[in-house]
Amino acid sequence: MKRKGTFQKILQYILALIVVVVVGYFFYDEFRKNWDAISTYDFDVNLYDVLISFVFMAFSSLLVTYIWQICVNDYLLKKLNFSESFVILNTSALLKYIPGKIWSYTAQIALMSSRGISKALLIYINLICFICFAIVSAIYTFSYYFFFLKVTPFGISILLFAMFIILDFTFIKWNAAVINRLINLINKLFKREIGPIKIKISLLVRVQLLYLVCLLSEGMCMYFLARGMGVSFSFSNIMAFTAIISVSSVIGYMVFISPGGLGVREGAMFVMLKQFSNIEAALILPIATRLVLIIIDVLLGVIGIWLGVKYRYFPMRAKRGKKQ
């Protein structure tokens, strides 16, 4: 069994490396083929706009922390305050760049072990959060293509949009039954028996609205980052940037072998940006956005570690775990 587990880990690392290398080579080849245009492009860097982009990305990350907090607190007798939630989520988030995507959840479980919340329930809550994010991303993206770009006749757009809303309503109303279909996969993946739980309708609606704000904030980040690098876009392109963030984030998350969606997310951004921007922006913006995201992740993670040590969140948890 140990050999089998070791082999699976090695295979994950190899596949993750292959994905990163392939995408890295793709971007290298695109840069090489378009180097003449890129080298002559006048990148007029505006540090003020770049700083604003960092603020929007940080705001989105903090909002994700708040979403996680309200979901977890719904099942805790002794509630987490925002500071504790910040430490747990942003410290564990530093591990998402390790292939496999389970290390962040493993760290969450370890940090939450003394809080009276089961490991299975914590995994389930993270699954619910992702599904809510994916639903919001899908509804926003298809709304953008249906009603803003008008890729389909208005009547068909209304029909398709209504179908998405009905699917979302079905999930919100009967989420336990819907999630139960996915439980078998999660049980096999984490080798645990996870039973479906009932989540309040009001909480799911609230979470989805907050995720919409997160997406819009990251769209604003991408817009100001483009401006900060001297790439000209109209303000209305924020809607397009938000759609790009929506699709690329979900794809990056679902490609399990890619650490933190690295490479996959940027590739999806490139394909979508290429539809309405020049090749320079399509190549540089995804990489620049990833750099902003990594810097924010590291900054918040370091602050989380500092807060955890200062307020003794880590030692307290470890101590309580021994007593139990």
Image: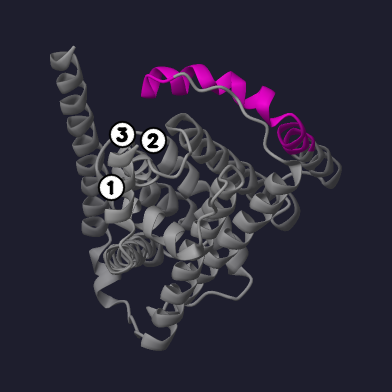
Q: Are the residues tagged 2 and 1 within 8 Å (C-beta)? A: no
Horizontal side of 68 relative to 310 (left or right) equals right
Q: Which residue lies furthest to the right in this view?
A: 155
Q: Is the residue 234 above or below the residue 308 in the image?
A: below
When asked about the image quadrant of residue 243, the answer is bottom right
Instruction: Decide: few, some or many residues near mark 2? Use Cα within 10 Å; few <14, some 14-19, many ≥20.
Output: some
Q: Is the residue 244 above or below the residue 321 in the image?
A: below
Taking depth in this image into account, of 132 and 158 the one nearest to the observer is 132
Instruction: Decide: few, some or many residues near mark 3? Use Cα within 10 Å; few <14, some 14-19, many ≥20.
Output: many
Horizontal side of 177 relative to 159 (left or right) equals left
The local secondary structure at tag 1 comes to helix
Residue tagged by mark 2? 255
Q: Is the residue 291 above or below the residue 250 in the image?
A: below
Q: Give the image location of residue 308, x and y in percent.
A: 31, 62
The C terminus lies in which quarter of the figure? top left
Q: Which of marks 2 and 1 is nearer the N terminus?
A: 2
Under mark 3, the amino acid is: Ile
Under mark 2, the amino acid is: Val
Q: Residue furthest front?
A: 323
Instruction: Decide: few, some or many residues near mark 1? Use Cα within 10 Å; few <14, some 14-19, many ≥20.
Output: some
Q: Give the image location of residue 234, x and y in percent.
A: 58, 75
Residue tagged by mark 3? 257
Residue 179 included in the magenta stretch of the image? yes
Q: Are the residues tagged 3 and 2 within 8 Å (C-beta)? A: yes
The local secondary structure at tag 2 comes to loop
Residue located 57% across and 59% down the image: 215
Cα separation, mark 1 vs mark 3, equals: 31 Å
For the question of whether residue 263 can be seen, the reply is no
Which is in the foreground here, disc 1 or disc 3? 1
Which disc number belongs to residue 318?
1
